[in-house]
Amino acid sequence: MGEIKLVKKLIIGSMFAALIMVLLPITSAVESNIVEENIKNQYISKINNIDIEKLKEKLDDPSSPTIFLVTLLIFLLRIVQISLAAFWGLVIMIIVILRNLGNKTAI
């Protein structure tokens, strides 16, 4: 008799856990959509307030080397990304090799 109650509790608990696991992504998706809509509304209001003539004057100014600096920054970040990927690849490879050194099982 006690085993049946335990099995019922186990089944109900498993179903409850599955329901929670199904519902959690739904709530975060709804929250994400709300935040995304708020951000879009903020940007739309900022875009509507831009003075196009002042923006053209800033872009036509030849004294600002922003495009060169942004391109250089992107290039440097790409180099850092590649070097970090190579570094972590080597670290993982060394860990795998060291783990397999002690594993001398015969086939």
Image (cartoon, helix red, strand yellow):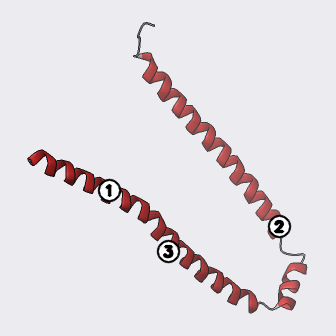
Q: Nearer the viewer, mark 3 or mark 1?
A: 1
Q: Nearer the viewer, residue 103 or 94?
A: 103
Can you identify the residue that label 2 sits on?
A: 67
Can you identify the residue that label 3 sits on?
A: 31
Can you identify the residue that label 1 sits on?
A: 15
Q: Are marks 2 and 3 in contact (CB under 8 Å)?
A: no
Q: Are marks 3 and 1 in contact (CB under 8 Å)?
A: no
Residue density around tag 3, few if under 14, some if 14–19, many if 20 or more, within 10 Å? few
> Mark 1 falls on what kind of element?
helix
Above or below: residue 98 compared with residue 106 = below
Between disc 2 and disc 3, whose residue precedes? 3
The x and y percentages for residue 50 are: 77, 90
Label 3, label 1: how many angstroms apart (C-alpha)? 25 Å
The x and y percentages for residue 43 are: 67, 83
Label 2, label 3: how many angstroms apart (C-alpha)? 37 Å
Q: Is residue 104 left or right of residue 13?
A: right
Residue at 56 percent of width and 38 percent of height: 88
The x and y percentages for residue 26 are: 48, 67
Q: Amino acid at mark 2?
A: Ile
Please state, as top left, top right, bottom left or bottom right, where the C terminus lies in the image: top left
Q: Nearer the viewer, mark 2 or mark 3?
A: 3
> Mark 2 falls on what kind of element?
helix
Between disc 2 and disc 1, whose residue precedes? 1
Q: Amino acid at mark 1?
A: Met
> Mark 3 falls on what kind of element?
helix
